[in-house]
Amino acid sequence: MDQTSSDTDQTSADSDQTTSDSEQLASDEDQAASDHESGVDGSSQRSRDLGSVHREHATNIRDEQARQRLRTAVARDITADERAQVAATREEIAAAREASAKARGERTSSPGSIRRAERTLRAANDRQRAANDRQRAADDRARAAEERARSAHDRTIAARDRAQAAIDREASETDELTHVRRRGAGMKQLQREVDRAHRAPEELVVTFIDVDGLKRVNDSQGHLAGDSLLVAVADSLRACLRSYDLIMRFGGDEFVCAMPNADVDGVRQRFDEVSDALAAGPIKASITVGFAELGDDDSAEDMIRRADEDLLARRGLTGRTEPDRHPS
């Protein structure tokens, strides 16, 4: 039983060292999170995201620390019970030998009496060590509770950071006026759609949309009226296209849309609906649209270029002129 207790002591000591090492790792992750968060200047989305990742890692480490401390506490309770049993056994042996010595009339200074005294002392030491083990087990449980509470707090902060990061990311990728994708974010999404359609393979149609008469409205009615015209176009696109279709503001009066798993005839029909909705609205807006179907080697830029060429051809056929087209 002495050997078993000694082995358990070693296991608990090893567990303490492991937990100590984990504490250092968690502290390092906390520091990394703080370093990234302190570097956030309102536009550094990557710094905010990295800070959230490090904080989440620290949380996971502390959760494992708490579980390890509880396992160590259980081991120490077992050791305390074993030591208490060893102490009781030693005391029983000492008492039995003391009674036997008295029956034989041994003197208290005899070697047997000395050994009995030593056993009694060792039993007292075992009981004290058992009490210490129980106290350390209680301390381990208390620290485990603290670490779990800190993990819960860190997890709340990490969740808040992720939510804020998502809001910031959405804001950075969304056009402030029309609330559709900005050009930079939209081009990345469009290229992903092109790559996916090539892999599948599946159909993909890209449209280039020009808002008719924006310059005339700006010059005659003011830029607020022009803004209202752009918002009306964006609202009509959202209303008539599918929820997962890409809508991107490409330039001042230009939009680009991407429609996966759709043929060009179906897309033309949807844009007829967009034109009808605009014509029936209070602003009486109109658009000109060019279409491009995905080719074997097309990139996102290739499809936009061909849709733009189709738009120019259609504008020439309809006789409309629009001198204010400009890319952003």
Image (tube, rainbow, N blue to C red):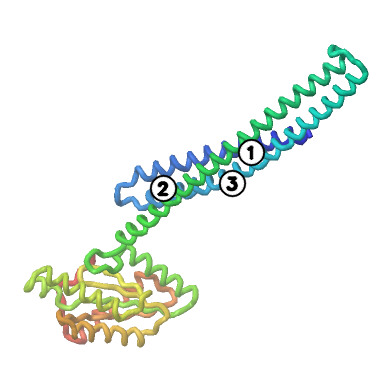
Q: Residue at x 87, y 18 (%)?
A: 112
Q: In the rendering, which numbered label is found on residue 15?
A: 1
Task: Determine the CA span between mark 2 and mark 1.
Answer: 29 Å
Q: Viewer-proximal residue, 256 or 151?
A: 151
- At label 2, the amino acid type is Gly
The C terminus lies in which quarter of the figure? bottom left
Q: In the rendering, which numbered label is found on residue 192?
A: none
Q: Secondary structure at mark 1?
A: helix
Q: Residue at x 23, y 72 (%)?
A: 254
- At label 1, the amino acid type is Ser
How many other residues sit within 10 Å of disc 2, few (<14), some (14-19) or many (≥20)?
many
The N terminus lies in which quarter of the figure? top right
State whether residue 221 is above or below residue 270: above
**Looking at the rendering, which quadrant does residue 159 occupy?**
bottom left
- Compared across the picture, whether 51 is left or right of 180 comes to right
Residue that extends furthest to the right in the rendered view of this protein: 104
Query: Which residue has dot 2 on it?
Result: 51
- Compared across the picture, whether 47 is left or right of 318 comes to right
Q: Secondary structure at mark 2?
A: helix
Question: Does the rendering let one see residue 239?
Answer: yes
Q: In the rendering, which numbered label is found on residue 67?
A: 3
